[in-house]
Amino acid sequence: MKAEDFLEKNEVREMTILSQLISHHGSISYNDMLDHLSVSKASLENDLESIKSWTATSNQCIAIHYDGQTINLKLGDEMSLLQIYRRYLDQSVKTKIITFLFKYQKFTITQLAQKLAISESSLFRKIKELNNYLKEFNIKIRNGRFDGEELQIRYFYFQFYYYIEDKRKLLSQFTSNQLTQTIQSLENYLKVTISSENKQKLRIWLIISKMRITIKKLQTDYLRNQMQPYLKDPLYHKIQVMVFRYFSRYSIEVDEGEAMLHFAYLLAFSILSENDFHEYRLLRDRHAPIASLDTYIAETIIIHFNYRRLPYMLEREMYYHLTHMHTLLYFFRGDIEYYDETVFIQEKQPVGKTLNPFAEKLLETSTWKFDNQMERQKSLLTILLSKYLSLLVFITSKMTKVLQVGIDLKLDDLYKETLSELLISKIRPLNGVHSERYVSHKKYDLILTNETQHDSDQYNEARVYVLSKILSSYDMRNIQRILQELNT
Amino acid sequence: MKVVIIGASFAGVAAALETRKRHPKAKIVLLEKQTTLAYIPNGLHLYWRNEIADLNEARFITEEQLEESRIDYYLEANVKKINTSQKIITYHYFGKYEMIAYDKLIIAAGSKQLSEKIKGSAQESVLKYKRYEEAEAALLKVKASERITIIGGGQVGIEAADLLSTQKKKVTMIESMDYIMFKYLDEDMIQPIQRKMIDRGIDLKLGKTVSTIDAVSDHEVNVHFADDSVTSESVIMSVNVRPHLPFLDTHIAQHTDQTIAVDRYLRTSIKDVFAVGDCIQLSGPDNDQVYIPLINNAVRTGIVAAANLNEPELEFKGSLRTIGTNVFGYYVASTGMTEGESLFSNHKVKTTRQKIKLTSLQNANTVTVKWIYDAETHVLLGAQMISTVNILEKINTLALAIETRQTIEDLQQKDYFFHPSYTQMIATTNLVSWMGERVDGDEG
């Protein structure tokens, strides 16, 4: 599901209006906005009215003005689009339903409708909408409580508190010495060091677990099934011992299921540092599903790029990331897509663009290996695809030697200067490429020129590309292709 | 003043007696769900040990003693509801609902052996015998059984395994952790007992968690764990106990683990309502709040609550989880923090394990002692003992040392008597490395 699924249609539109205004330097004409939203002027007016009414109370952090011709937005220096987004999510009824459910574990329609000050029928409708989105997580709200695999319920809450609801609120409400001590104990038990950022993730997870622990019937059938190859896993064993010992100190009954939940979480959400993970990787069973998929994918990557082998530390890092991704795919269902900052890799970066088909192939391979049902998994797969892609970008950029490109244009001096600079700025976003105006006798990998050369030795061994039309997209595509070839 | 106490086991009776001592004029009423008064939990073990001839003898106080103290008690009085706003308790008593008002209320309802995770654990053929009626039924069932499966290798489970294997029963013991009695002893200390258990033919299944129990016939039950199962005529549940408090009203605050939240005077979140015994968490060996359902804690909390009925006078000092028992020919005792548990604390601990002669004589018996102490300050945090002779009382000395925050060095200076037939140069409870045979450790 998407973060905006928590919002109503009009709220999504309002968010879009604000986001458009920010992308257009705070000012946009009615016509452009209407085109972008494809709505009537009356409904745009409604939306603006609604924005105005809540921004009026925002202590001038945000102010909107419109006059039928232009819309203007003013943001305070400390206001970001993310904060605005958060404000919308905070107000959303669906968000409130989930937070209520989290706090009390169950509700009756009458009680919750009263609490949210909405009618029972509209509450029903909201729950139905929510359930529709929750399908990909394989869970649903039924009889006033969550129904489904416990791992999925906690995972959904985790995503929810990490991306949707303000996690600071949750942390300040529930963080206790006991929680800090528990994380410290975990570090002691596993003999690992957890970074402060990961401790925050872990805190959220443990708070969720604490809220869920006393629920009598936790479903863990799927998890237990998936855990079969991991019952003798050294990390799992340690977690199991710790879980049993920890809960023996309270009047709480737990079984292996609880330990399994934490095992899956710790591995999928990269709680361990690369170093600590490496220690575990040396001990784990290499034939278990996740490890063997890691190896398969790692080899596919190495072969694809014709690398003989990766530097030791880079290989370790690759395995580190692969295990997280594959653990996610192996145990978990669904995801909340939030503010996709990885989009830039896919769309804007030329390197990303060329690697995309390969990332897709990797994803196809891993889903096939785990026999995953693609269609139920859309969001998780989208996230995994972008993870594969960033991993590929990461590896290729680490492995790329910097290619030297010399630009040797035969033109009038003024044009030559200008066009060379423009060409350099076009090539700059490409990873691992350094371009400059040609300096004679310097060694280059690629020469870009606009005239066919007569002296074949002029550029030594450099490959030469003659531009068909300076700055044309046709040439840019060819240059990218050649650079890729030079790199492999 | 009218003091109503829910539960007439150790905590409730202790609270009643202490209340009488402090408030000679108070009206004291005990409401007990069971049919019998003051039954010693797991009294069945005393019977199997031939220490009592009849289960009925397993009592820690008699009706007469209560009557002498002018304490009213109602047996088979099942409390259904507490109304803390009106200070009224509703209970079910011989087919009728009765109400009783109180000025002060002490909740001493104890705990139950129940599992919500093990499917089928509620069925009749699965024996629990903490209470008298349960014990009566269990006694007959066990007599008729040849093979018995015990779920849970804590103190109660191991005692049962010992007694039943003496009766030539074929015993299987299933424990979730990698070793038995893990709450009290470290893995290095428990080895002799585990070896003895195997020698005695006990099928020890460690690191296994029971998932399901199902009856295969009128006489046989299957217990499933991981990818294995075991068949026997009887199954004994000796898993952790938990409070069972369906009658609480929503005003009384509870912890996540369903225990009642109390302050150090054992007051609940509601005025004039106290909670004691197995219903509450205590401050444990590391001064953190933990659940330690032991009889010594029940008695002590009962006394403390009674002392605080009118004014907060007496703080509860906490529990070191001191235990002692005799199983499979070994006397074992423990107090304070274990090395395994120390990972949950802020202390960096050091440990030393020594085998020490108990007397100055040539053929003296030995005891293996393990000390757990703070690496920096050397303050004693925990101790464990195992011996083939009765050293149980010695653990109390170490418990007192921990409570009074003695260091290892302090202990060496303590004034103990010497007699060659009964002691050696240095008291066994002292860690002096030149007297003992160092078995293991990292003393520094």
Image (cartoon, rainbow, N blue to C red):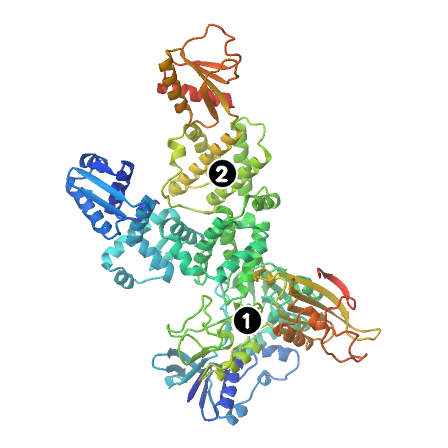
The residue tagged 1 is B292
Which quadrant, please, contains the N terminus of chain A? top left
Q: Nearer the viewer, mark 1 or mark 2?
A: 1
Outermost residue to the right: B362
Compared with A221, A485 (above or below) is above
Asked which quadrant contains residue A30, the reply is: top left
Q: Amino acid at mark 1?
A: Ile
Percent across and percent down for residue A365 are 47, 35
Image coordinates of residue A100 in percent, x first then y, are 34, 59
Mark 2 and mark 1 in contact (Cβ < 8 Å)? no
B275 relative to B197 in the view: left or right: left
Label 1 Cα crowd, 10 Å radius (few <14 / some 14-19 / many 20+) = many
Q: At numbered mark 2, what does the secondary structure look like: helix, strand or loop?
A: helix
Q: Is residue B304 left or right of residue A58?
A: right
The residue under label 2 is which amino acid type? Lys
The label number, if any, that marks residue A369 in the structure image: 2
Residue at point 52%, 84% (across, down)? B13
Residue A150, position as x, y percentages in the image: 44, 55
Q: Nearer the viewer, residue B34 or B317?
A: B317
Q: Residue at x 36, y 48 (%)?
A: A135
Residue B371 visible? The answer is yes
Q: Chain of mark 1?
A: B
